[in-house]
Amino acid sequence: MSPKDVPSADPRTPRTRRDRCPGALRPWPADDGLLVRLRLVGGRLPASTLRDVAAVAAEFGDGRVRVTGRANIQLRALPGHDGRLTPEAFHAVEGTGLLPSPAHELVRNIMASPCTGRTGGRADLRPLAAALDGLLCADPRRAGLPGRFLFVLDDGRGDLVERSCDLGLTALDARVAQVRVGDGWGPVVPLDEAPGAIVRLADEFLARRGEGPSAAWHVAELPAPLTDPVPPDPRLPDAAPPLPYGPLAGGGRHVPVPDAGLDRAAAEALAEEALAAGDGERGDLVVTPWRGVLVPGRAQ
């Protein structure tokens, strides 16, 4: 059984064990070998990195790159002993660049509106997501966040406004956002101050969550609210449907990824398409929360 097969527990259920979310330093022992999950901040995946990951999967795993409902990627059937990757496999994974801070690899769970900064939305949240990731990795204490603790950033289009989270925000316009705190809402803050406001709440969660196997995994499990609740701002967007598969109005397309994942040829083809788009960046693809990949492209 893999973590994908384990049913989600009620967030208010008392804990009796630590979370077991897999990473490169803490793989999941599956029937076919070790499973590793690699975090992508806001789902962003440079084309060159996808090529590198596909090469690792081909050399050490089952040859396929899978995506998750949290917009991350997974590799299966990796070699190892006693719950650890072999040194060769670990160094290959590390060489993809997806472990900027190995100590924090399990806590870099930052989901963002996939099309933010490309088309639609009220604000470009890509710099904000990167800043939040930087703050998480800057403090050794924050490596103690649970592996299931999730940050969700909606750029005001409403595609993630109903996605459950521990902390996050929803943009109200190009300058301000309302912070999300578990199932409720927190203060309205300027966007450039939002990463700091969010990590301060994460630090408060760490101070309150308790110790040992019974420690809380989620904000909703705390015995008292993390912060004083605030009414939802009237400028909050209505919930939007998931991003459809196929061509997108602003250019590019949303490609579904099968449960079996992408083989090396398919991954190489997507990387080549992204690089050919010439969007002025690194040919970034975006893994989406709907188990797809957003491939950049020029508007027709």
Image (cartoon, helix red, strand yellow):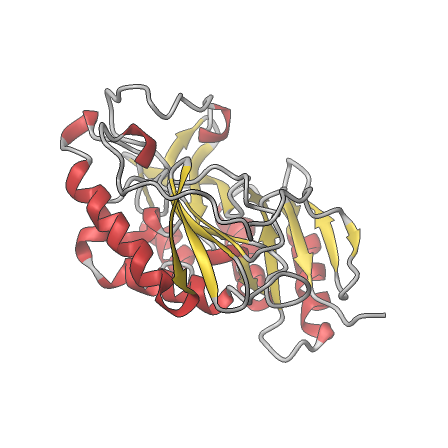
Q: Is residue 148 left or right of residue 237?
A: left
Q: Is residue 15 left or right of residue 194?
A: left
Which one is nearer the viewer's eye here, 221 or 228?
A: 228
Residue 103 appears anywhere in the view: no
Q: What residue appears at the point 68 percent right and 67 percent down from the top-left corner?
A: 274
Residue 123, given in percent of the width and then of the height, sits at 56, 66
203 relative to 45 in the view: left or right: left
Q: Position of residue 76 (x, y in %)?
A: 50, 39
Q: Position of residue 273 (x, y in %)?
A: 73, 66
Q: Nearer the viewer, residue 104 or 81?
A: 104
Q: Residue at x 47, y 44 (%)?
A: 232
Relative to 27, residue 245 above or below: below
Can residue 61 be spotted in the picture? yes
Percent position of residue 269, x then y: 72, 60
Q: Nearer the viewer, residue 291 or 11?
A: 11
Direction bottom: furthest residue = 280
In the rendered view, would you say 134 is above or below 162? below
Q: Residue at x 37, y 41 (%)?
A: 166
Numbered circles on residues, count: 0
Instruction: Specify the quadrant of the image occupied by residue 277.
Output: bottom right
Of the 4 image quadrants, the one containing the C terminus is bottom right
